[in-house]
Amino acid sequence: MSQEPAARQPLEPAAADAVRAYAARTRADADRFASALEDIAANGLPAVEECTPWEELREAHLARLAAQRPAVA
């Protein structure tokens, strides 16, 4: 009693392009993260003076998100 797997539903061309673009962005992000980890493994952690405090990174990210959001009247 073997059952055939359900057929996949093809995506619209625009949706397929969007998925491919998302995959490319995700792959690029993973490559940057892996590169940073490899650098730490090879050279150790950076000096504290060279690092940006996480609070500054958070505020910069929140500012970018706020800039992308349309203003509410």
Image (cartoon, rainbow, N blue to C red):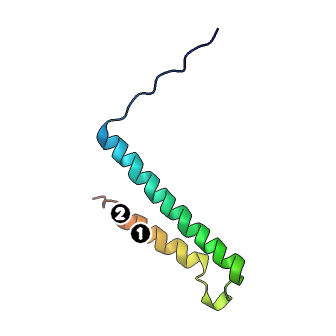
Measured along the vertical axis of the image, is residue 69 above or below residue 8? Answer: below
Q: Position of residue 24 (x, y in %)?
A: 44, 56
Counting the numbered discs, the total is: 2
Residue lying at 68% horizontally and 78% vertically, measured from the top left = 40
Figure check: 61 above or below 45 = above
Mark-to-mark CA distance, 2 and 1: 6 Å
Tag 2 near tag 1, CB within 8 Å? yes
Residue sitting at x 38%, y 31%: 10
Q: Which mark is residue 64?
A: 1
Q: Residue furthest left?
A: 73
According to the picture, the residue beneath numbered tag 2 turns out to be 68
- Of residues 71 and 55, the one drawn nearer to the viewer in this rendering: 55
Residue found 35% across the figure and 63% down from its top? 68
Which one is in front, 71 or 33?
Answer: 33
The front one of 38 and 58 is 38
Amino acid tagged 2: Gln
44 vs 36, left or right, is right
Measured as percent of width and height from the top left, residue 34 is found at 61, 67
Q: Amino acid at mark 1?
A: Arg
